[in-house]
Amino acid sequence: MKKNSTFMLVFVFAALVVGCGNKTHPVKVHVDPDLDSGAIERIAVFPFSSSVHDSDDPDEMAPKTMDRLFRKELDARGDYKFISPSSVEYALRGAGLDQEAKQFIDTWRRKKEVDENFIRRAAEALEADAVIVGVVDLWQKDEVDYRETSTPATYVGATITLFRLEDGKMLFEAADEDFLEGATSEAGDRGAMISGSGAVQSDRASNMYKAPEFEEVAVKVARALALSIPRR
């Protein structure tokens, strides 16, 4: 593995605003001076991986959800030919590169290192100019206890990185985080029925004060990331 230490990144902020107060989305964008979007036509989209702790996403729904929503947002663009994760996996498996691909994604997620040898071999198998690697960084719900006066909220964050297949150079990266709040719960107003031991026997209002579903937030993040890719 060779660490790509030649990144000369320019910080820019996307102009797309999709909620979260006055914060712009994505919240951070890096563009390499060597990026020439006109030279890139076919982009292979790797499946999302996840840095989320198992306890926050035991069923691994975070990468699956982001795969689906991100792909839908990419389909709305007409300037690039995006190769879907399922087609990417099929091509890599056919070339005997599926395990190396998983290692490539994992090593990038954990160490920010690029296997340039794999990149060059993948270029032939994928017949693409670049690849996008996505990582889910945040997948969290803050629920409210019936004894609290507080507001439930759901948080989602993800990062996408674009690599040139010719040499493995990172040309673009965008990171976004967003959230949605539910209804504020007032302590003592929930009407919960509590047993003598303190256990909740009934809390009919609990559904009113639940944190929003993950997909409601994830779709905003997926849209911001898809739109942040420089136009061709």
Image (cartoon, helix red, strand yellow):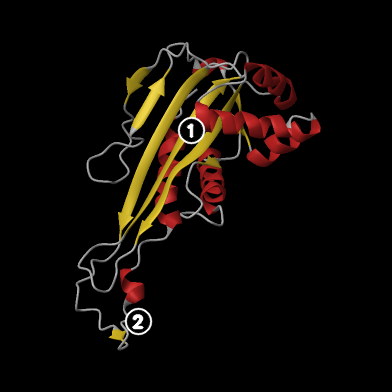
Q: Which residue lies furthest to the front in this view?
A: 197
As drawn, 49 above or below 206: above
As drawn, 4 above or below 63: above
Labels 1 and 2: the sequence-earlier one: 1
| Residue at image location 23% in from the left, 70% down from the top | 185
- In the image, taking residue 95 as reference, residue 49 lies left or right, namely left
Amino acid type at circle 1 is: Ile
| Residue at image location 50% in from the left, 22% down from the top | 232
Label 1 – label 2 distance at C-alpha: 44 Å
Pair 1/2: label in front: 2
Task: Count how many numbered circles sit on residues in the image.
Answer: 2
Residue 21 place in picture, x, y as percent: 23, 45
User: On the image, numbered disc 1 is attached to which residue?
Assistant: 160
Residue 49 place in picture, x, y as percent: 55, 40
Q: Tell whether label 2 touches label 1 (CB within 8 Å).
A: no
Amino acid type at circle 2 is: Ala
Q: Is label 2 in a helix, a strand or a loop?
A: loop
As drawn, 36 above or below 202: above
Using a 10 Å C-alpha cutoff, classify the residue at mark 1 as few (fewer than 14 neighbours), some (14 to 19) or many (20 or more): many
User: On the image, numbered disc 2 is attached to which residue?
Assistant: 199
Residue 95 visible in rendering: yes
